[in-house]
């Protein structure tokens, strides 16, 4: 599996000059997506809706609204 491309604006384009807050989204060679964000599993795990769940190898990751909105135009429809 390889990173094919960034989805949306780079952290620098979104104003992150320090590298302290650098959420990012990437499209992978198998068509899935990888996300760099803040691990919020401990905070949000018990707050998941009753029809949602995660396994031990999954984490709940938070990215900023701006990161996702700036990526919207690069996310394929199909």
Image: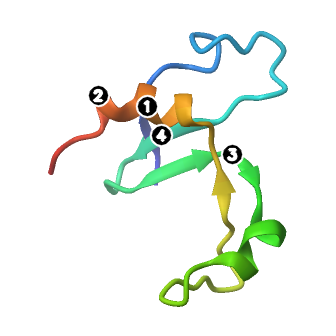
Q: Considering depth in this image, is 56 or 69 the residue closer to the camera?
A: 69
Residue at screen point 29% across, 28% down: 73
Q: Mark 4 and mark 2: span between their CA atoms?
A: 13 Å
Which residue was labeled with disc 4? 26
> Could you say whether the residue bearing mark 2 is in a helix, strand or loop?
helix
In the image, residue 12 lies at what x, y percent?
A: 64, 12
- Compared to residue 11, the image places residue 13 above or below, namely above
Q: Mark 1 and mark 2: span between their CA atoms?
A: 8 Å
Which residue was labeled with disc 2? 73
Colouring rule applied to residues: rainbow
Mark 1 closeness class: few <14, some 14–19, many ≥20 residues within 10 Å: few
In the rendered structure, which disc, 4 or 1, sits on the residue that comes first in sequence?
4
Using the rendered image of the protein, determine whether residue 60 is visible from the camera's viewpoint. yes
> Could you say whether the residue bearing mark 1 is in a helix, strand or loop?
helix
In the image, residue 20 lies at what x, y percent?
A: 84, 26
Mark 3 closeness class: few <14, some 14–19, many ≥20 residues within 10 Å: some
Q: Mark 3 and mark 1: span between their CA atoms?
A: 15 Å
Which residue was labeled with disc 3? 37
Which residue was labeled with disc 1? 69
């Amino acid at each position: 599996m390889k990173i094919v491309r960034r989805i949306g604006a780079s952290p620098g384009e979104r104003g992150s000059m320090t590298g302290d807050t650098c959420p990012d989204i990437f499209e992978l060679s198998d068509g899935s997506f990888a996300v760099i964000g803040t691990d919020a599993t401990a905070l949000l795990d018990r707050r998941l809706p009753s029809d949602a769940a995660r396994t031990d190898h999954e984490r709940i990751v938070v990215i900023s609204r701006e990161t996702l909105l700036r990526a919207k135009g690069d996310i394929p429809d199909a």
